[in-house]
Amino acid sequence: MSEKYILDGHEPVPCEDLLEWARWLETADRHVAETHIGTTRISTVFLGLNHQRGSGPPLIFETVIFGGKLNGYQRRCSTWDEAEAQHQDGVRAVRARDQPRSQTETG
């Protein structure tokens, strides 16, 4: 399995040539999505490197939450479509955690 990947549109493509991969990374737009909710930022990007340690599909997309109650949340996946869904999961999680408590809640 390749360790380095580039994108052809939204499709990850293995890239064994280190120079070709590095040149691609210099100018590529690797952002899948970015959402700001208050001071919290949810960012999903194409990593270009396989972070899979063991068997399974390459983990080459990553969603991270910066700030708020879920600061440091991180998930990785293999495809652009999974990355978009993973990003929306992060957005929903932030919205659910950052909702003000109702007046009837205690604790």
Image: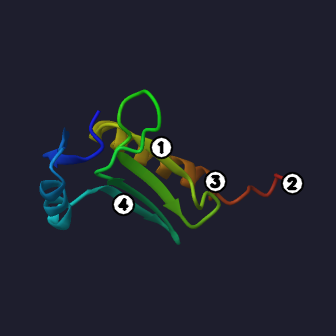
Crowding near the residue tagged with mark 3, few <14, some 14–19, many ≥20 C-alpha atoms within 10 Å:
few
Q: Which residue is mark 1?
A: 89
Q: Residue furthest right?
A: 107
Q: Is residue 61 above or below residue 55?
A: below
State the image coordinates of residue 6 (x, y, percent, origin top left).
19, 48
Amino acid type, residue under disc 4 in the picture? Glu
Q: Quadrant of residue 101?
A: bottom right
> What residue is drawn where x is 15% and y is 49%?
17
Q: In this orientation, which residue lies closer to the viewer: 23 or 106?
A: 23
Q: Is residue 103 above or below residue 8?
A: below
**Earlier residue among tags 2 and 4:** 4
Q: Which residue is mark 4?
A: 34
The quadrant of the picture occupied by the N terminus is top left
The secondary element bearing badge 4 is classed as strand
Q: Which residue is mark 2?
A: 106
Measure the C-alpha gap from mark 2 to mark 4. 33 Å
State the image coordinates of residue 45 (x, y, percent, origin top left).
33, 55
Q: Nearer the viewer, mark 1 or mark 2?
A: 1
Measure the C-alpha gap from mark 3 to mark 1. 12 Å
